Image (spheres, helix red, strand yellow):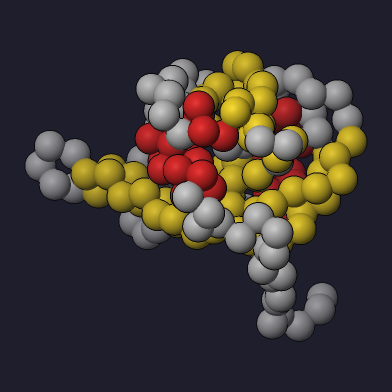
């Protein structure tokens, strides 16, 4: 699967790490919205669960190893080019993370990493539009931060 002009929607994950009223964001090194601040995250790899993908992406981009607690949000991004073709189509699953270990540092697809006040981030032009919309949902109490949804798999082991 590819992100630019995909043949099918791409499943992505975002890792939500909160500290009081602040959210951990990374400055994106690659499109879409390169240079903007966003939740750490990326594509789910074939055969990988969303919780594992969120943990892996968070560690790759920030150096933190956090326990996935469950899903708190699902959004989609569908971007079309000037002739109406689908340029990007992502289904984004946001996973709440807790019990973090490690040293915070930017890596792989991130050029910087830091905590943002949720309310300020929800209004900042420096933050990616999809992340601003998500942060506004947090501010408005529309994200179940205290009760993430467990993710079960119906696949047989092995």
Q: Residue at x 13, y 47 (%)?
A: 84
Q: Give how far across and how far down residue 119 sits, in percent.
A: 51, 33
Front-lying residue, 46 or 79: 79
Q: Residue at x 74, y 48 (%)?
A: 97
Q: Give how far across and how far down residue 65 sits, in percent.
A: 83, 39
Q: How many marks?
A: 0
Q: Residue at x 66, y 21 (%)?
A: 113
Apparent side of residue 126 relative to residue 48 in the rendered image (left or right): left
Q: Kindly tell me whether residue 23 is visible in this rendering.
A: yes
Q: Give how far across and how far down residue 124 sits, in percent.
A: 43, 24
Height in image: 143 above or below 55? below
Front-lying residue, 102 or 47: 102
In the image as oriented, which residue stretches furthest toward the left?
A: 83
Q: Quadrant of residue 128?
A: top left
Front-lying residue, 7 or 69: 69
Apparent side of residue 48 relative to residue 127 in the rendered image (left or right): right
Q: Give how far across and how far down residue 98 sits, in percent.
A: 80, 48
Q: Quadrant of residue 148?
A: bottom right
Apparent side of residue 80 relative to residue 56 in the rendered image (left or right): left
Height in image: 28 above or below 86? above
Height in image: 139 above or below 7? above
Q: Kindly tell me whether residue 31 is visible in this rendering.
A: no
Q: Residue at x 66, y 26 (%)?
A: 115
Apparent side of residue 140 relative to residue 77 in the rendered image (left or right): right
Quarter holding the C terminus is bottom right
């Amino acid at each position: 699967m590819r992100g630019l002009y995909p043949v099918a929607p791409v499943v992505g994950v975002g890792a939500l790490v909160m500290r009081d009223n602040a959210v951990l964001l990374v400055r994106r090194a690659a499109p879409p919205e390169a240079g903007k601040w966003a939740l750490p995250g990326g594509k789910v790899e074939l055969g990988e669960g969303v919780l594992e993908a969120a943990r892996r992406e968070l560690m790759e981009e920030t150096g933190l190893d956090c326990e996935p607690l469950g899903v708190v949000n699902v959004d989609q991004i569908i971007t079309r080019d000037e002739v109406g073709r689908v340029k990007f189509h992502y289904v984004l699953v946001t996973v709440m993370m807790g019990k973090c270990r490690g040293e915070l540092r930017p890596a792989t697809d991130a050029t910087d990493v830091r905590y943002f006040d949720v309310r300020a981030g929800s209004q900042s032009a420096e933050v990616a539009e999809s992340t601003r919309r998500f942060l506004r949902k947090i501010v408005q109490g529309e994200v179940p931060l205290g009760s993430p949804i467990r993710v079960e798999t119906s696949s047989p082991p092995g």
